[in-house]
Every structure is written in structure tokens, then in C-alpha cells.
Image (cartoon, coloured by chain):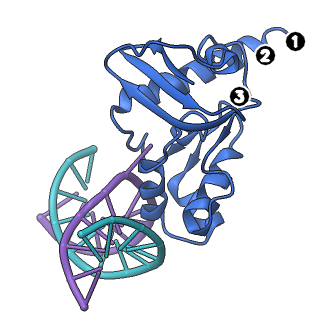
Chain colours: A blue, B purple, C cyan
Amino acid sequence: MEGSLRFGLYHVYIRWNERDIVERVRFLKKEFPGNVPPSFRSYFAGKVTLLSPLLSVHVGQDGVFGQIYKIVSDIPYGETRTYKEIADLAGTGARVVGMAMKRNLTPIIIPCHRVVSSDGIGGFTPDVQIKKDLLDLEKKVLKRLENLN
DNA sequence: ACAGGAGTCAAAG
DNA sequence: CTTTGACTCCTGT
């Protein structure tokens, strides 16, 4: 089960299994035929702030990386944390957090775009612009939700 | 063993 | 304000 949807200049590819475990998320230049999970589509349309029932293959992963992925998964929608903050919680260094983010197989599902550097936005593979766009989307959605109250 | 990374901080220019 | 260097620590080779 796989497919892609458009987001800015990229196509977001997603592959998941029959138990809604997401195995891979990638940012491609070309469209990939197929479908994507409803909540995934809703997320990019700014209609949901949670991606249930989707889970990442990284859930339950051992070691420091697993710990980091777990902590990052708990960052609330629309908020950010620094590499150092995550590092302190995981008992490691900021660069290791950067490494873990780079090797995250399932961005969006594990919201690595919410992890920024202490003096700016930090990096993002393959293009920092995607990170900016994702944070922008979440910020706008939160603002819209506030105005409803 | 060892180089290097999506970082951080303080010191120096 | 920008640049440099030391620091740290885990991972792949």
C-alpha cells in the first residue's frame, strides 16, 4: 500500500502495511501513483492535528535512536523543540539527535520537522523549505482553531 | 580504531 | 555581527 500526494514543490510518498504501520515516507520530485491513508491526506489539508491510527516502524526501536524517536513523537502539533532539548531528555548530545533525524524513515509520522536548532531552523533532508512549509502549515491551522473559540 | 554529523557554546576577530 | 574551535557522543566502516 503506497502512493503520494502533492505538497509544495514536492510529492510526499508514503508506504504502509495492513496494520497501519508506516514503513517509509519520502519527499520526491515526481508523483507516485496510488493512494495515501485518509488521515495523512487530512493532515496536509490542515484538517487534523493527529495522524491516528498511523504508527511508525520506529516505534519500539531499541537504543538511543529509539528513545529520541519516542521523545520527538511527543512534541505537540505546532510546537518546536531544539536539538539540545531533545538531547538532554534522551541523555545524549545534540549532534546525535541530528543524526537520528536524518535517518528517520518516517518523517511527518515522527515529526522531525518540529526539531530546530537553537539559533535557527536547523537542517532537513532533502530540502529545508519542506520543514519551513510544514511548520507554517501547523502554525496556520492552530491559529485558525484558536479563532473558533 | 576512527572519521564525521540536520549541534552548541564561548571566545576571538 | 561573523568566524573559529573545542566539546560531545553515537554510528558506520
Q: Secondary structure at mark 2?
A: helix
Quarter in which the C terminus of chain A is drawn? top right
Task: Indicate the position of residue A117 as horizontal and vertical percent values.
Answer: 45, 49
List the residue tagged with mark 2. Answer: A146
Q: Secondary structure at mark 1?
A: loop
* Residue that appears at 31% across and 19% down: A29
Count the numbered circles shown. 3
Badge 2 crowding class, 10 Å Cα cut-off, few under 14, some 14 to 19, many 20 or more, is: few
* Residue that appears at 51% across and 13% down: A34
Query: What's the amino acid at mark 3?
Result: Leu
* Residue that appears at 57% across and 67% down: A64
Query: What's the amino acid at mark 1?
Result: Asn
Q: Secondary structure at mark 3?
A: loop
For marks 2 and 3, give the CA distance. 20 Å
* Residue that appears at 72% across and 11% down: A144
List the residue tagged with mark 3. Answer: A51
Q: Which of the marked residues, 3 or 1, is nearer the chain's N terminus?
A: 3
Query: What's the amino acid at mark 2?
Result: Glu
Asked if marks 1 and 2 touch (Cβ < 8 Å), the reply is yes
